[in-house]
Protein backbone atom coordinates (compact mmCIF):
# COMPACT_ATOMS: atom_id res chain seq x y z
CA UNK A 1 0.00 0.00 0.00
CA UNK A 2 1.40 3.39 -1.04
CA UNK A 3 0.91 6.74 0.67
CA UNK A 4 -1.56 7.69 -2.04
CA UNK A 5 -3.49 4.48 -1.39
CA UNK A 6 -3.57 5.20 2.32
CA UNK A 7 -4.91 8.71 1.63
CA UNK A 8 -7.57 7.32 -0.71
CA UNK A 9 -8.49 4.69 1.88
CA UNK A 10 -9.02 7.38 4.53
CA UNK A 11 -11.21 9.50 2.24
CA UNK A 12 -13.18 6.46 1.09
CA UNK A 13 -13.59 5.30 4.70
CA UNK A 14 -14.99 8.62 5.90
CA UNK A 15 -17.34 8.72 2.89
CA UNK A 16 -18.47 5.19 3.72
CA UNK A 17 -18.97 6.17 7.38
CA UNK A 18 -21.20 9.09 6.41
CA UNK A 19 -23.20 6.93 3.98
CA UNK A 20 -23.75 4.35 6.72
CA UNK A 21 -25.08 6.99 9.13
CA UNK A 22 -27.26 8.67 6.51
CA UNK A 23 -28.80 5.39 5.31
CA UNK A 24 -29.25 3.98 8.82
CA UNK A 25 -27.15 0.87 8.10
CA UNK A 26 -25.42 -1.14 10.78
CA UNK A 27 -21.65 -1.56 10.75
CA UNK A 28 -22.13 -5.25 9.90
CA UNK A 29 -24.18 -4.55 6.79
CA UNK A 30 -22.28 -5.98 3.77
CA UNK A 31 -23.23 -2.86 1.79
CA UNK A 32 -20.71 -0.86 3.83
CA UNK A 33 -17.93 -2.89 2.18
CA UNK A 34 -19.48 -2.27 -1.25
CA UNK A 35 -19.76 1.50 -0.65
CA UNK A 36 -16.16 1.67 0.56
CA UNK A 37 -14.98 -0.27 -2.49
CA UNK A 38 -16.85 2.02 -4.91
CA UNK A 39 -15.52 5.17 -3.23
CA UNK A 40 -11.96 3.82 -3.25
CA UNK A 41 -12.29 2.82 -6.91
CA UNK A 42 -13.54 6.27 -7.96
CA UNK A 43 -10.67 7.90 -6.05
CA UNK A 44 -8.29 5.76 -8.07
CA UNK A 45 -8.83 8.06 -11.03
CA UNK A 46 -7.23 11.50 -11.29
CA UNK A 47 -9.53 14.49 -11.33
CA UNK A 48 -8.65 16.94 -14.04
CA UNK A 49 -6.67 20.10 -13.26
CA UNK A 50 -8.91 23.07 -12.65
CA UNK A 51 -8.37 26.78 -12.24
CA UNK A 52 -7.71 28.04 -8.74
CA UNK A 53 -10.95 30.00 -8.69
CA UNK A 54 -12.93 26.87 -9.67
CA UNK A 55 -11.15 24.80 -7.00
CA UNK A 56 -11.95 27.38 -4.31
CA UNK A 57 -15.57 27.52 -5.43
CA UNK A 58 -15.85 23.74 -5.26
CA UNK A 59 -14.32 23.66 -1.77
CA UNK A 60 -16.69 26.35 -0.51
CA UNK A 61 -19.67 24.58 -2.03
CA UNK A 62 -18.50 21.28 -0.52
CA UNK A 63 -18.12 22.86 2.95
CA UNK A 64 -21.50 24.62 2.83
CA UNK A 65 -23.48 21.63 1.54
CA UNK A 66 -21.72 19.23 3.96
CA UNK A 67 -22.53 21.45 6.95
CA UNK A 68 -26.17 21.80 5.88
CA UNK A 69 -26.69 18.05 5.40
CA UNK A 70 -24.81 17.16 8.61
CA UNK A 71 -26.90 19.54 10.74
CA UNK A 72 -30.15 18.39 9.10
CA UNK A 73 -29.45 14.67 9.63
CA UNK A 74 -27.56 14.83 12.94
CA UNK A 75 -30.48 14.04 15.27
CA UNK A 76 -31.60 11.00 13.28
CA UNK A 77 -28.05 9.66 12.90
CA UNK A 78 -27.19 10.03 16.61
CA UNK A 79 -30.47 8.87 18.15
CA UNK A 80 -28.94 5.51 19.12
CA UNK A 81 -26.38 7.14 21.41
CA UNK A 82 -26.96 8.42 24.94
CA UNK A 83 -23.41 9.72 25.46
CA UNK A 84 -22.85 13.39 24.63
CA UNK A 85 -19.33 12.49 23.47
CA UNK A 86 -20.64 10.02 20.91
CA UNK A 87 -23.30 12.49 19.74
CA UNK A 88 -20.67 15.15 19.14
CA UNK A 89 -18.43 12.61 17.43
CA UNK A 90 -21.31 11.62 15.17
CA UNK A 91 -21.77 15.24 14.05
CA UNK A 92 -18.06 15.61 13.25
CA UNK A 93 -18.00 12.31 11.35
CA UNK A 94 -21.12 13.29 9.41
CA UNK A 95 -19.59 16.58 8.35
CA UNK A 96 -16.19 15.15 7.35
CA UNK A 97 -17.72 12.06 5.71
CA UNK A 98 -20.27 14.03 3.68
CA UNK A 99 -17.48 16.37 2.60
CA UNK A 100 -15.53 13.34 1.36
CA UNK A 101 -18.60 12.01 -0.46
CA UNK A 102 -19.13 15.36 -2.16
CA UNK A 103 -15.44 15.58 -3.02
CA UNK A 104 -15.78 12.30 -4.92
CA UNK A 105 -19.10 13.31 -6.46
CA UNK A 106 -17.90 16.74 -7.63
CA UNK A 107 -14.79 15.17 -9.17
CA UNK A 108 -16.86 12.66 -11.12
CA UNK A 109 -19.39 15.28 -12.26
CA UNK A 110 -16.66 17.72 -13.29
CA UNK A 111 -14.97 15.08 -15.44
CA UNK A 112 -18.26 14.09 -17.08
CA UNK A 113 -19.19 17.73 -17.78
CA UNK A 114 -15.89 18.18 -19.61
CA UNK A 115 -16.74 15.05 -21.60
CA UNK A 116 -13.34 13.54 -20.90
CA UNK A 117 -12.33 10.01 -20.00
CA UNK A 118 -10.90 9.24 -16.60
CA UNK A 119 -7.35 7.89 -16.49
CA UNK A 120 -5.54 6.25 -13.61
CA UNK A 121 -2.73 8.26 -12.07
CA UNK A 122 -0.14 5.48 -12.15
CA UNK A 123 2.93 7.69 -12.58
CA UNK A 124 2.81 9.07 -9.04
CA UNK A 125 1.91 5.69 -7.65
CA UNK A 126 4.94 4.10 -9.32
CA UNK A 127 7.27 6.57 -7.60
CA UNK A 128 6.00 5.75 -4.15
CA UNK A 129 7.33 2.94 -2.02
CA UNK A 130 4.70 0.31 -1.30
CA UNK A 131 3.89 -0.75 2.25
CA UNK A 132 2.70 -4.35 2.65
CA UNK A 133 1.88 -4.41 6.37
CA UNK A 134 5.07 -6.40 6.90
CA UNK A 135 7.71 -6.36 9.60
CA UNK A 136 11.34 -5.43 8.82
CA UNK A 137 12.92 -8.14 6.67
CA UNK A 138 16.11 -8.30 8.76
CA UNK A 139 14.17 -9.83 11.68
CA UNK A 140 14.57 -13.60 11.98
CA UNK A 141 11.55 -15.87 12.17
CA UNK A 142 12.38 -16.81 15.76
CA UNK A 143 12.69 -13.16 16.78
CA UNK A 144 9.30 -12.41 15.25
CA UNK A 145 7.75 -15.45 16.94
CA UNK A 146 8.98 -14.66 20.45
CA UNK A 147 8.78 -10.89 20.10
CA UNK A 148 5.28 -11.04 18.65
CA UNK A 149 4.11 -13.41 21.38
CA UNK A 150 5.46 -11.13 24.11
CA UNK A 151 3.87 -8.01 22.57
CA UNK A 152 0.50 -9.75 22.29
CA UNK A 153 0.69 -11.06 25.86
CA UNK A 154 1.54 -7.60 27.21
CA UNK A 155 -1.41 -6.07 25.32
CA UNK A 156 -3.72 -8.68 26.88
CA UNK A 157 -2.32 -8.28 30.40
CA UNK A 158 -4.53 -5.31 31.45
CA UNK A 159 -7.62 -7.38 30.65
CA UNK A 160 -6.33 -10.17 32.89
CA UNK A 161 -5.69 -7.75 35.74
CA UNK A 162 -9.18 -6.28 35.35
CA UNK A 163 -10.93 -9.65 34.95
CA UNK A 164 -8.85 -11.43 37.61
CA UNK A 165 -8.82 -14.39 38.14
CA UNK A 166 -10.50 -14.90 34.75
CA UNK A 167 -13.96 -14.78 33.19
CA UNK A 168 -16.08 -17.80 34.13
CA UNK A 169 -19.56 -18.47 32.76
CA UNK A 170 -21.97 -21.35 33.44
CA UNK A 171 -19.88 -23.74 31.31
CA UNK A 172 -16.74 -22.80 33.23
CA UNK A 173 -18.44 -23.42 36.58
CA UNK A 174 -19.65 -26.86 35.44
CA UNK A 175 -16.05 -27.80 34.58
CA UNK A 176 -14.81 -26.41 37.90
CA UNK A 177 -17.32 -28.61 39.73
CA UNK A 178 -15.76 -31.64 38.06
CA UNK A 179 -12.26 -30.48 38.98
CA UNK A 180 -13.04 -30.16 42.71
CA UNK A 181 -15.09 -33.38 42.77
CA UNK A 182 -18.51 -31.75 43.20
CA UNK A 183 -19.71 -33.67 40.13
CA UNK A 184 -18.48 -36.56 38.01
CA UNK A 185 -16.27 -36.02 34.97
CA UNK A 186 -18.17 -35.75 31.69
CA UNK A 187 -17.13 -35.27 28.09
CA UNK A 188 -20.11 -32.98 27.51
CA UNK A 189 -17.52 -30.24 27.96
CA UNK A 190 -14.32 -31.85 26.59
CA UNK A 191 -12.71 -33.85 29.37
CA UNK A 192 -9.27 -33.07 27.94
CA UNK A 193 -9.90 -29.35 28.44
CA UNK A 194 -11.26 -29.93 31.95
CA UNK A 195 -8.10 -31.90 32.78
CA UNK A 196 -5.95 -29.02 31.50
CA UNK A 197 -7.77 -26.62 33.80
CA UNK A 198 -7.37 -29.13 36.63
CA UNK A 199 -3.62 -29.46 36.03
CA UNK A 200 -2.91 -25.72 36.37
CA UNK A 201 -5.48 -25.29 39.13
CA UNK A 202 -3.77 -27.93 41.26
CA UNK A 203 -0.37 -26.43 40.47
CA UNK A 204 -1.78 -23.19 41.81
CA UNK A 205 -3.07 -24.98 44.91
CA UNK A 206 0.53 -25.89 45.74
CA UNK A 207 1.27 -22.19 46.24
CA UNK A 208 -2.03 -20.93 47.62
CA UNK A 209 -5.20 -22.14 49.29
CA UNK A 210 -7.26 -19.39 47.65
CA UNK A 211 -9.34 -20.89 44.78
CA UNK A 212 -9.29 -17.58 42.91
CA UNK A 213 -5.51 -17.42 42.86
CA UNK A 214 -5.32 -21.10 41.96
CA UNK A 215 -7.68 -20.79 38.98
CA UNK A 216 -5.69 -17.77 37.77
CA UNK A 217 -2.79 -20.15 37.06
CA UNK A 218 -4.89 -21.68 34.29
CA UNK A 219 -5.93 -18.27 32.94
CA UNK A 220 -2.28 -17.22 32.67
CA UNK A 221 -1.38 -20.55 31.02
CA UNK A 222 -4.18 -20.06 28.48
CA UNK A 223 -2.99 -16.50 27.76
CA UNK A 224 0.56 -17.73 27.18
CA UNK A 225 -0.63 -20.55 24.91
CA UNK A 226 -2.83 -18.26 22.82
CA UNK A 227 -0.11 -15.59 22.61
CA UNK A 228 2.32 -18.26 21.34
CA UNK A 229 -0.24 -19.45 18.79
CA UNK A 230 -0.69 -15.88 17.56
CA UNK A 231 3.08 -15.42 17.50
CA UNK A 232 3.38 -18.55 15.40
CA UNK A 233 0.94 -17.18 12.82
CA UNK A 234 2.80 -13.85 12.71
CA UNK A 235 6.16 -15.59 12.25
CA UNK A 236 4.83 -17.77 9.42
CA UNK A 237 3.46 -14.71 7.63
CA UNK A 238 6.80 -12.95 8.17
CA UNK A 239 8.61 -15.85 6.50
CA UNK A 240 6.26 -15.67 3.52
CA UNK A 241 6.83 -11.93 3.28
CA UNK A 242 3.42 -10.23 3.71
CA UNK A 243 0.81 -9.44 6.32
CA UNK A 244 2.80 -10.09 9.52
CA UNK A 245 2.34 -6.58 10.93
CA UNK A 246 -1.40 -6.54 10.15
CA UNK A 247 -1.80 -9.93 11.89
CA UNK A 248 0.16 -8.72 14.93
CA UNK A 249 -2.05 -5.62 15.24
CA UNK A 250 -5.21 -7.70 14.83
CA UNK A 251 -4.28 -10.17 17.57
CA UNK A 252 -2.89 -7.60 19.99
CA UNK A 253 -5.28 -4.67 19.58
CA UNK A 254 -8.75 -5.99 18.71
CA UNK A 255 -10.30 -6.16 22.20
CA UNK A 256 -12.37 -9.34 21.88
CA UNK A 257 -9.13 -11.32 21.46
CA UNK A 258 -7.96 -10.12 24.87
CA UNK A 259 -11.36 -10.84 26.44
CA UNK A 260 -11.42 -14.38 25.06
CA UNK A 261 -7.81 -14.96 26.14
CA UNK A 262 -8.86 -14.53 29.79
CA UNK A 263 -12.16 -16.42 29.47
CA UNK A 264 -12.18 -20.04 30.62
CA UNK A 265 -13.89 -21.60 27.62
CA UNK A 266 -12.96 -24.66 25.60
CA UNK A 267 -13.42 -22.65 22.40
CA UNK A 268 -10.36 -20.52 23.12
CA UNK A 269 -7.61 -23.20 23.26
CA UNK A 270 -9.48 -25.03 20.49
CA UNK A 271 -9.01 -21.96 18.28
CA UNK A 272 -5.31 -21.97 19.18
CA UNK A 273 -4.99 -25.63 18.16
CA UNK A 274 -6.69 -24.90 14.82
CA UNK A 275 -4.25 -22.00 14.31
CA UNK A 276 -1.26 -24.30 14.85
CA UNK A 277 -2.80 -26.97 12.60
CA UNK A 278 -3.35 -24.44 9.80
CA UNK A 279 0.19 -23.06 10.28
CA UNK A 280 1.51 -26.57 9.77
CA UNK A 281 -0.52 -27.00 6.57
CA UNK A 282 0.48 -23.49 5.43
CA UNK A 283 4.19 -24.23 5.94
CA UNK A 284 4.03 -27.48 3.97
CA UNK A 285 2.21 -26.02 0.96
CA UNK A 286 4.24 -22.79 0.86
CA UNK A 287 7.55 -24.64 0.58
CA UNK A 288 7.45 -27.52 -1.87
CA UNK A 289 10.50 -29.25 -0.37
CA UNK A 290 9.00 -29.48 3.12
CA UNK A 291 7.56 -32.91 3.88
CA UNK A 292 4.54 -33.46 6.08
CA UNK A 293 5.65 -33.37 9.76
CA UNK A 294 3.98 -36.64 10.80
CA UNK A 295 4.32 -36.33 14.57
CA UNK A 296 3.05 -32.74 14.76
CA UNK A 297 0.20 -33.51 12.36
CA UNK A 298 -0.96 -36.46 14.46
CA UNK A 299 -0.64 -34.57 17.78
CA UNK A 300 -2.46 -31.46 16.54
CA UNK A 301 -5.07 -33.54 14.72
CA UNK A 302 -5.76 -35.55 17.86
CA UNK A 303 -6.05 -32.44 20.05
CA UNK A 304 -8.29 -30.80 17.48
CA UNK A 305 -10.63 -33.79 17.64
CA UNK A 306 -10.63 -34.00 21.44
CA UNK A 307 -11.09 -30.34 22.34
CA UNK A 308 -14.44 -30.08 20.57
CA UNK A 309 -16.81 -32.72 19.24
CA UNK A 310 -17.30 -30.79 16.01
CA UNK A 311 -13.51 -30.67 15.68
CA UNK A 312 -13.61 -34.44 15.11
CA UNK A 313 -16.20 -34.03 12.34
CA UNK A 314 -14.23 -31.14 10.81
CA UNK A 315 -11.06 -33.25 10.76
CA UNK A 316 -12.90 -36.06 8.96
CA UNK A 317 -14.18 -33.51 6.41
CA UNK A 318 -10.65 -32.13 5.98
CA UNK A 319 -8.95 -35.42 5.07
CA UNK A 320 -10.69 -36.02 1.67
CA UNK A 321 -9.83 -32.47 0.54
CA UNK A 322 -6.24 -32.94 1.71
CA UNK A 323 -5.98 -36.16 -0.29
CA UNK A 324 -7.47 -34.41 -3.33
CA UNK A 325 -5.38 -31.23 -3.30
CA UNK A 326 -2.01 -32.30 -1.84
CA UNK A 327 -0.94 -34.94 -4.33
CA UNK A 328 2.68 -35.09 -3.14
CA UNK A 329 1.75 -36.28 0.36
CA UNK A 330 -1.35 -38.40 -0.17
CA UNK A 331 0.06 -41.58 1.39
CA UNK A 332 1.36 -39.73 4.46
CA UNK A 333 -1.92 -37.82 4.88
CA UNK A 334 -4.00 -40.97 4.64
CA UNK A 335 -1.86 -42.84 7.17
CA UNK A 336 -1.79 -39.89 9.59
CA UNK A 337 -5.53 -39.30 9.20
CA UNK A 338 -6.36 -42.93 9.97
CA UNK A 339 -3.99 -42.88 12.94
CA UNK A 340 -5.61 -39.72 14.37
CA UNK A 341 -9.11 -41.14 14.02
CA UNK A 342 -7.98 -44.40 15.64
CA UNK A 343 -6.35 -42.61 18.59
CA UNK A 344 -9.43 -40.43 19.14
CA UNK A 345 -11.79 -43.40 19.02
CA UNK A 346 -9.56 -45.24 21.50
CA UNK A 347 -9.48 -42.28 23.92
CA UNK A 348 -13.20 -41.52 23.65
CA UNK A 349 -14.07 -45.19 23.96
CA UNK A 350 -12.11 -47.58 26.20
CA UNK A 351 -9.89 -44.97 27.87
CA UNK A 352 -12.67 -42.62 28.99
CA UNK A 353 -14.90 -45.56 29.91
CA UNK A 354 -12.10 -46.92 32.06
CA UNK A 355 -11.95 -43.61 33.95
CA UNK A 356 -15.77 -43.40 34.19
CA UNK A 357 -15.93 -40.28 32.02
CA UNK A 358 -19.44 -40.04 30.65
CA UNK A 359 -19.91 -39.03 27.00
CA UNK A 360 -22.31 -36.32 25.88
CA UNK A 361 -25.77 -37.75 25.26
CA UNK A 362 -27.25 -38.22 21.79
CA UNK A 363 -29.72 -35.38 22.37
CA UNK A 364 -26.85 -32.89 22.45
CA UNK A 365 -26.26 -33.43 18.73
CA UNK A 366 -29.90 -32.81 17.76
CA UNK A 367 -30.10 -29.03 18.22
CA UNK A 368 -31.13 -28.17 14.66
CA UNK A 369 -33.54 -31.10 14.03
CA UNK A 370 -35.28 -30.53 17.38
CA UNK A 371 -35.73 -26.83 16.64
CA UNK A 372 -37.19 -27.65 13.23
CA UNK A 373 -39.71 -30.16 14.54
CA UNK A 374 -40.54 -27.81 17.41
CA UNK A 375 -41.23 -24.98 14.94
CA UNK A 376 -43.77 -27.21 13.19
CA UNK A 377 -45.49 -27.86 16.52
CA UNK A 378 -45.37 -24.20 17.59
CA UNK A 379 -46.95 -23.19 14.28
CA UNK A 380 -49.75 -25.69 15.01
CA UNK A 381 -49.31 -27.55 11.73
CA UNK A 382 -51.48 -30.54 10.95
CA UNK A 383 -49.92 -33.89 11.90
CA UNK A 384 -50.97 -37.45 11.18
CA UNK A 385 -51.96 -39.70 14.05
CA UNK A 386 -48.72 -41.64 13.71
CA UNK A 387 -46.58 -38.48 13.76
CA UNK A 388 -48.38 -37.25 16.87
CA UNK A 389 -47.84 -40.59 18.62
CA UNK A 390 -44.10 -40.59 17.79
CA UNK A 391 -43.65 -37.07 19.13
CA UNK A 392 -45.68 -37.71 22.30
CA UNK A 393 -43.60 -40.83 22.93
CA UNK A 394 -40.59 -38.55 23.46
CA UNK A 395 -41.81 -35.24 24.92
CA UNK A 396 -44.71 -33.59 26.69
CA UNK A 397 -45.87 -30.89 24.27
CA UNK A 398 -48.09 -29.06 26.78
CA UNK A 399 -45.77 -26.10 27.30
CA UNK A 400 -43.86 -26.17 24.03
CA UNK A 401 -45.21 -22.77 22.93
CA UNK A 402 -43.84 -21.14 26.10
CA UNK A 403 -40.52 -23.01 26.04
CA UNK A 404 -39.64 -22.67 22.37
CA UNK A 405 -37.01 -19.99 21.64
CA UNK A 406 -36.13 -19.51 17.94
CA UNK A 407 -32.48 -18.62 18.62
CA UNK A 408 -31.74 -21.04 21.48
CA UNK A 409 -31.96 -24.84 21.22
CA UNK A 410 -31.21 -25.76 24.83
CA UNK A 411 -34.86 -25.42 25.90
CA UNK A 412 -35.95 -28.07 23.41
CA UNK A 413 -33.04 -30.34 24.34
CA UNK A 414 -33.96 -30.11 28.01
CA UNK A 415 -37.59 -30.85 27.11
CA UNK A 416 -36.44 -34.05 25.41
CA UNK A 417 -34.18 -34.97 28.33
CA UNK A 418 -37.12 -34.46 30.71
CA UNK A 419 -39.12 -36.86 28.56
CA UNK A 420 -37.80 -40.04 26.93
CA UNK A 421 -34.59 -39.36 24.96
CA UNK A 422 -33.88 -43.10 24.88
CA UNK A 423 -36.82 -43.58 22.51
CA UNK A 424 -35.05 -41.49 19.84
CA UNK A 425 -31.69 -43.12 20.49
CA UNK A 426 -33.13 -46.63 20.23
CA UNK A 427 -35.18 -45.85 17.11
CA UNK A 428 -32.93 -43.54 15.10
CA UNK A 429 -34.19 -44.74 11.72
CA UNK A 430 -37.84 -44.24 12.63
CA UNK A 431 -37.29 -40.71 13.95
CA UNK A 432 -35.13 -39.80 10.98
CA UNK A 433 -38.14 -40.75 8.88
CA UNK A 434 -40.36 -38.54 11.04
CA UNK A 435 -37.99 -35.61 10.64
CA UNK A 436 -37.86 -36.10 6.86
CA UNK A 437 -41.63 -36.50 6.45
CA UNK A 438 -42.25 -33.21 8.29
CA UNK A 439 -39.60 -31.53 6.16
CA UNK A 440 -41.41 -32.59 2.97
CA UNK A 441 -44.71 -31.22 4.33
CA UNK A 442 -43.41 -27.99 5.92
CA UNK A 443 -40.08 -26.97 4.33
CA UNK A 444 -40.69 -23.29 5.12
CA UNK A 445 -40.88 -23.99 8.86
CA UNK A 446 -37.69 -26.04 8.69
CA UNK A 447 -35.75 -23.35 6.82
CA UNK A 448 -37.00 -20.60 9.13
CA UNK A 449 -36.11 -22.60 12.25
CA UNK A 450 -32.65 -23.35 10.87
CA UNK A 451 -31.97 -19.73 9.94
CA UNK A 452 -33.24 -18.33 13.25
CA UNK A 453 -30.89 -20.67 15.10
CA UNK A 454 -27.67 -20.59 13.04
CA UNK A 455 -28.21 -18.14 10.17
CA UNK A 456 -25.80 -15.65 11.70
CA UNK A 457 -22.90 -17.96 10.88
CA UNK A 458 -23.43 -17.12 7.20
CA UNK A 459 -25.18 -13.72 7.27
CA UNK A 460 -23.07 -10.80 8.56
CA UNK A 461 -25.74 -8.28 9.57
CA UNK A 462 -26.95 -10.04 12.71
CA UNK A 463 -26.97 -8.47 16.17
CA UNK A 464 -24.50 -10.40 18.29
CA UNK A 465 -22.86 -9.61 21.62
CA UNK A 466 -19.11 -10.13 21.45
CA UNK A 467 -16.56 -9.61 24.20
CA UNK A 468 -18.85 -7.72 26.58
CA UNK A 469 -18.87 -10.31 29.38
CA UNK A 470 -17.27 -9.65 32.76
CA UNK A 471 -16.51 -11.47 35.97
CA UNK A 472 -17.51 -14.85 37.35
CA UNK A 473 -20.97 -16.34 37.41
CA UNK A 474 -22.50 -16.64 40.89
CA UNK A 475 -21.43 -19.92 42.53
CA UNK A 476 -21.05 -21.67 45.88
CA UNK A 477 -17.34 -22.46 45.56
CA UNK A 478 -15.65 -19.23 46.59
CA UNK A 479 -14.87 -18.06 43.07
CA UNK A 480 -15.47 -14.31 42.85
CA UNK A 481 -14.63 -11.46 40.51
CA UNK A 482 -11.69 -9.67 42.19
CA UNK A 483 -10.15 -7.16 39.73
CA UNK A 484 -6.60 -6.04 40.41
CA UNK A 485 -7.08 -2.79 38.50
CA UNK A 486 -10.26 -0.75 38.23
CA UNK A 487 -11.81 2.66 38.51
CA UNK A 488 -14.01 4.65 36.15
CA UNK A 489 -11.27 5.14 33.56
CA UNK A 490 -10.57 1.41 33.24
CA UNK A 491 -14.23 0.39 33.20
CA UNK A 492 -15.25 3.11 30.75
CA UNK A 493 -12.22 2.48 28.58
CA UNK A 494 -13.06 -1.20 28.20
CA UNK A 495 -16.69 -0.34 27.49
CA UNK A 496 -15.73 2.11 24.73
CA UNK A 497 -13.28 -0.33 23.14
CA UNK A 498 -15.98 -3.00 22.97
CA UNK A 499 -18.64 -0.56 21.69
CA UNK A 500 -16.42 0.61 18.84
CA UNK A 501 -17.23 -2.69 17.18
CA UNK A 502 -20.83 -1.51 16.80
CA UNK A 503 -19.89 2.04 15.75
CA UNK A 504 -17.09 1.90 13.18
CA UNK A 505 -17.90 0.62 9.66
CA UNK A 506 -15.61 -2.04 8.18
CA UNK A 507 -14.04 -2.49 11.64
CA UNK A 508 -17.46 -3.68 12.80
CA UNK A 509 -17.25 -6.51 10.26
CA UNK A 510 -14.50 -8.01 12.44
CA UNK A 511 -17.22 -8.60 15.05
CA UNK A 512 -19.44 -10.57 12.66
CA UNK A 513 -18.85 -14.30 12.27
CA UNK A 514 -20.88 -14.28 9.05
CA UNK A 515 -18.41 -11.81 7.52
CA UNK A 516 -15.52 -14.19 8.23
CA UNK A 517 -17.44 -17.06 6.68
CA UNK A 518 -18.05 -15.22 3.42
CA UNK A 519 -14.51 -13.88 3.45
CA UNK A 520 -13.21 -17.45 3.62
CA UNK A 521 -15.59 -18.63 0.87
CA UNK A 522 -14.56 -15.72 -1.37
CA UNK A 523 -10.87 -16.56 -0.86
CA UNK A 524 -11.49 -20.22 -1.73
CA UNK A 525 -13.06 -19.09 -5.01
CA UNK A 526 -10.12 -16.78 -5.72
CA UNK A 527 -7.65 -19.58 -5.03
CA UNK A 528 -9.48 -21.92 -7.37
CA UNK A 529 -9.58 -19.22 -10.06
CA UNK A 530 -5.83 -18.67 -9.59
CA UNK A 531 -5.36 -22.46 -9.77
CA UNK A 532 -3.74 -22.55 -6.32
CA UNK A 533 -5.30 -25.86 -5.34
CA UNK A 534 -3.01 -26.69 -2.42
CA UNK A 535 -3.54 -23.30 -0.77
CA UNK A 536 -7.25 -24.09 -0.46
CA UNK A 537 -6.31 -26.52 2.32
CA UNK A 538 -5.47 -23.60 4.63
CA UNK A 539 -9.13 -22.56 4.45
CA UNK A 540 -10.77 -26.00 4.55
CA UNK A 541 -10.39 -26.75 8.26
CA UNK A 542 -11.87 -23.43 9.55
CA UNK A 543 -14.66 -23.64 6.97
CA UNK A 544 -15.36 -27.26 7.91
CA UNK A 545 -15.85 -26.10 11.51
CA UNK A 546 -18.42 -23.54 10.30
CA UNK A 547 -20.20 -26.30 8.35
CA UNK A 548 -20.54 -28.34 11.54
CA UNK A 549 -22.03 -25.28 13.27
CA UNK A 550 -24.60 -24.91 10.50
CA UNK A 551 -25.61 -28.51 11.08
CA UNK A 552 -25.62 -28.82 14.86
CA UNK A 553 -24.92 -25.56 16.75
CA UNK A 554 -27.31 -24.98 19.68
CA UNK A 555 -27.12 -21.18 19.39
CA UNK A 556 -25.46 -18.40 17.42
CA UNK A 557 -22.32 -17.58 19.40
CA UNK A 558 -19.17 -15.81 18.19
CA UNK A 559 -16.95 -18.06 20.28
CA UNK A 560 -18.12 -21.17 18.42
CA UNK A 561 -16.62 -19.75 15.22
CA UNK A 562 -13.58 -18.25 16.94
CA UNK A 563 -11.24 -20.71 15.21
CA UNK A 564 -12.19 -19.18 11.84
CA UNK A 565 -11.62 -15.68 13.24
CA UNK A 566 -8.14 -16.46 14.51
CA UNK A 567 -7.02 -18.19 11.32
CA UNK A 568 -8.25 -15.39 9.04
CA UNK A 569 -4.78 -13.73 8.70
CA UNK A 570 -3.47 -17.07 7.39
CA UNK A 571 -6.47 -17.48 5.12
CA UNK A 572 -6.03 -14.01 3.59
CA UNK A 573 -2.32 -14.57 3.12
CA UNK A 574 -2.97 -17.94 1.44
CA UNK A 575 -4.56 -15.96 -1.37
CA UNK A 576 -2.31 -12.88 -1.47
CA UNK A 577 0.87 -14.13 0.13
CA UNK A 578 2.03 -17.56 -1.02
CA UNK A 579 3.93 -17.25 -4.23
CA UNK A 580 3.27 -13.50 -4.48
CA UNK A 581 6.07 -12.16 -2.36
CA UNK A 582 9.62 -13.00 -1.49
CA UNK A 583 10.17 -14.69 1.82
CA UNK A 584 11.71 -12.60 4.51
CA UNK A 585 15.29 -13.47 5.32
Image: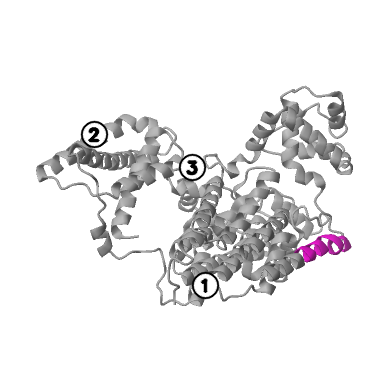
Q: Residue at x 44, y 43 (%)?
A: 503
Q: Dots 3 and 1: beta carbons under 8 Å?
A: no
SS class, disc 3? loop
Q: Quadrant of the N terminus?
A: bottom left
- Residue 458 appearing in the image: yes
What colour scheme was applied to this rendering of the protein? one colour
With 245 as the anchor, is 126 left or right in this view?
Answer: left
Rendered position, 352 above or below 418: below
Read off the residue under disc 1.
145
Read off the residue under disc 2.
65
Q: Quadrant of residue 314?
A: bottom right
Q: CA distance from mark 3 to mark 1?
A: 32 Å
> For this rendering, which residue is in front, 531 or 105?
531
Rendered position, 93 above or below 281: above
The mark nearer the N terminus, 3 or 1, is 3
Read off the residue under disc 3.
28
SS class, disc 1? helix
Q: CA distance from mark 2 to mark 3?
A: 28 Å
The picture places residue 478, in percent across and down from the top left corner, at 71, 55
Q: Quadrant of the C terminus?
A: bottom left
The mark nearer the N terminus, 2 or 3, is 3
Magenta residue span: 341-354
Amino acid sequence: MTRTSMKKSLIAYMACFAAMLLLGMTVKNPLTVVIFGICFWLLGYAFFPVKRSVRIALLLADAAVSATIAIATYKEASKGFSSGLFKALTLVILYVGIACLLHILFGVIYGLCLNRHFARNDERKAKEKAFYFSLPENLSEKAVFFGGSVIIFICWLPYFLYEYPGIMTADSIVQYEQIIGASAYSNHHPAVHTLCISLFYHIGKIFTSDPNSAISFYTIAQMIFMALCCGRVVSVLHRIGKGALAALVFYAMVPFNAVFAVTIWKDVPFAGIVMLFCCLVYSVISEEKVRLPYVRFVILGTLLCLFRTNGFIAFILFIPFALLFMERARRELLCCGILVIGIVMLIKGPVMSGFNIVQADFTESLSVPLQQVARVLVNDRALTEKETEEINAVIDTTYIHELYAPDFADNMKELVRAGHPDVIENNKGEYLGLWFSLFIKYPGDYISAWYDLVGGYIYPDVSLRVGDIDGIMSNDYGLVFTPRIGGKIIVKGKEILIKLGSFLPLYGMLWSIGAYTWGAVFIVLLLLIKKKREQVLVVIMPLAIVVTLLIAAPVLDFRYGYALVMTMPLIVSSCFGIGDGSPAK
